[in-house]
Each structure stands twice: as structure tokens, then as C-alpha cells.
């Protein structure tokens, strides 16, 4: 919900900055006060994390479209970066938040694989279903050889399976994001489906 509020506030912020930058001193003062208010609001409310430089490059067209929804032209964006870098920085963060929200809404499976553990999650509507594969020997399943050993020795006494379910907190997308920050990756769920079928 807060991302929609942020987007609304920023659309008005950019409206005043880009369309009325050369108006009266009173309007300029209002603009500065408004920017400060939005900065305070966003500092408190930022939900996720800024995209990396590489991610911004991959989403270049989407960012152009994002600015276009606020009637910000290329020249106006260049002016913001030069004269109001703090506003431009916040726009990047707002865009990042919106992208994360969309990605997390679409995520259906997460995986987190370490040398002796494989955590596989199905992201259901009301909770997460987990399949955990644990190796009790020194085989490293993050290597090609180690994963091959696992495939050939699923019934070995050193391979342990566990199933569990966990309810989301009040914000399931933030739960997903925190898991990604801890090393999980979004997948199509092939491993989850395979091991879930194997043990059920």
C-alpha cells in the first residue's frame, strides 16, 4: 500500500519541480518544503532496497516508462539529476520499490542452497511450504560432483528430508524479500516439485 502512496506523492513533487520551477519565490519555497516532507516520509517508509546498477541497466526502458507516467521528459530528468540530485536519487528508490513489489508478487518458489543444505520453498497464498534436504556427510552439493552424488544417493543414510509449513507475517512480500537478502533466489520450482513428489 505504501508504494502507491509514495508514487502519488512523487508524482505531485515532480509536477511542481518540473512544471513550475521558474515561478514565484513563494512557489519555490513551497517546492522545497514539499521535497523535505517527502524525503522524511520516504526515509521512514522505504520497504526494500535500491536496484543495482546492472539491474537499472536491464530495466532502462521500464524506468523510462515509469518517468513517462509522471509526465517527466528526458530533458526534465536530466535537469533533476543535475539540479536536484536528491530528488533523482529518491526517484530511483521509488522505482526500485515498485519493481521489487511486482517481482515479489509474482514469485512462487524460492531456493537457498548451501554445501550441506537445500532449502526449497513453495510460496503459497497464506503460508510457505518448505522441503529441506540435509547432508550429514562432507559432500558439498553446491558443486557439480556433490549434486551428482546427491542424485545418485537419495536413499543414503546421510541424506535427510524434512517438510514444514510456516505462516507469513503481516507482510508476506517483506518475508520473501528478507529471505532473498539472506541468499535465497527465485526459481520456477523444479527442485521443490521433484523432492516434494519424492518424499510424499
Image (spheres, grey):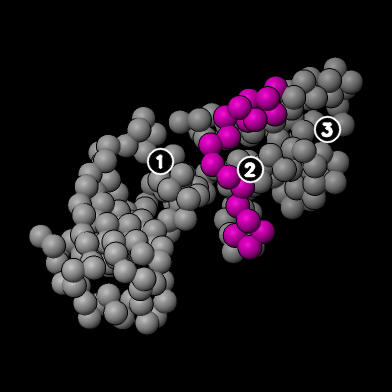
Q: Main secondary structure of the magenta part?
A: helix
Q: Residue 127, position in %: x, y?
A: 26, 41
Q: Is residue 27 above or below residue 118?
A: above
Q: Which residue is mark 3?
A: 21
Query: Which residues are the magenta region?
Result: 37-55
Residue 193 shows in this picture: no
Q: Which residue is mark 2?
A: 93
Closer to the observer: label 2 or label 3? 2
Marks 1/2: CA distance?
19 Å
Instruction: Please count the marks in the image.
Output: 3
Corner quadrant of residue 26: top right
Quarter of image, res 52: bottom right
In the rendered view, does 62 fall on the left or right side of 164?
right
Crowd rating for badge 2 (residues with CA inside 10 Å; few <14, some 14–19, many 20+): some
Q: Give residue 149's position: percent from left, percent from top.
A: 29, 79
Which mark, residue 175? Answer: 1
- For marks 1 and 2, the one nearer the N-term is 2
Labels 2 and 3: the sequence-earlier one: 3
Q: Residues within 10 Å of mark 3 (few under 14, many from 20)?
A: some
Pick the front one: 138 or 151: 138
Amino acid at each position: 500500500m505504501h508504494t502507491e502512496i509514495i508514487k502519488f506523492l512523487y508524482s505531485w513533487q515532480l509536477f511542481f519541480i518540473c512544471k513550475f520551477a521558474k515561478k514565484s519565490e513563494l512557489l519555490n519555497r513551497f517546492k522545497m518544503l514539499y521535497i523535505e516532507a517527502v524525503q522524511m516520509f520516504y526515509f521512514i517508509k522505504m520497504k526494500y532496497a535500491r536496484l543495482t546498477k546492472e539491474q537499472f541497466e536491464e530495466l532502462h526502458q521500464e524506468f523510462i516508462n515509469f518517468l513517462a507516467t509522471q509526465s517527466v521528459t528526458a530533458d526534465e530528468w536530466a535537469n533533476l539529476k543535475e539540479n536536484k540530485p536528491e530528488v533523482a536519487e529518491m526517484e530511483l528508490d521509488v522505482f526500485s520499490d515498485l519493481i521489487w513489489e511486482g517481482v515479489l508478487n509474482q514469485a512462487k518458489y524460492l531456493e537457498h542452497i548451501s554445501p550441506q543444505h537445500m532449502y526449497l520453498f513453495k510460496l503459497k497464498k497464506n503460508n510457505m511450504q518448505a522441503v529441506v534436504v540435509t547432508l550429514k556427510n562432507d559432500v558439498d552439493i553446491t558443486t557439480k560432483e556433490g549434486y551428482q552424488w546427491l542424485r545418485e544417493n537419495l536413499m543414503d543414510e546421510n541424506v535427510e528430508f524434512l517438510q514444514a509449513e510456516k505462516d507469513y507475517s503481516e507482510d508476506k512480500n517483506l518475508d520473501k524479500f528478507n529471505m532473498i537478502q539472506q541468499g535465497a533466489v527465485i526459481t520456477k520450482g523444479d527442485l521443490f516439485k521433484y523432492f516434494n513428489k519424492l518424499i510424499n
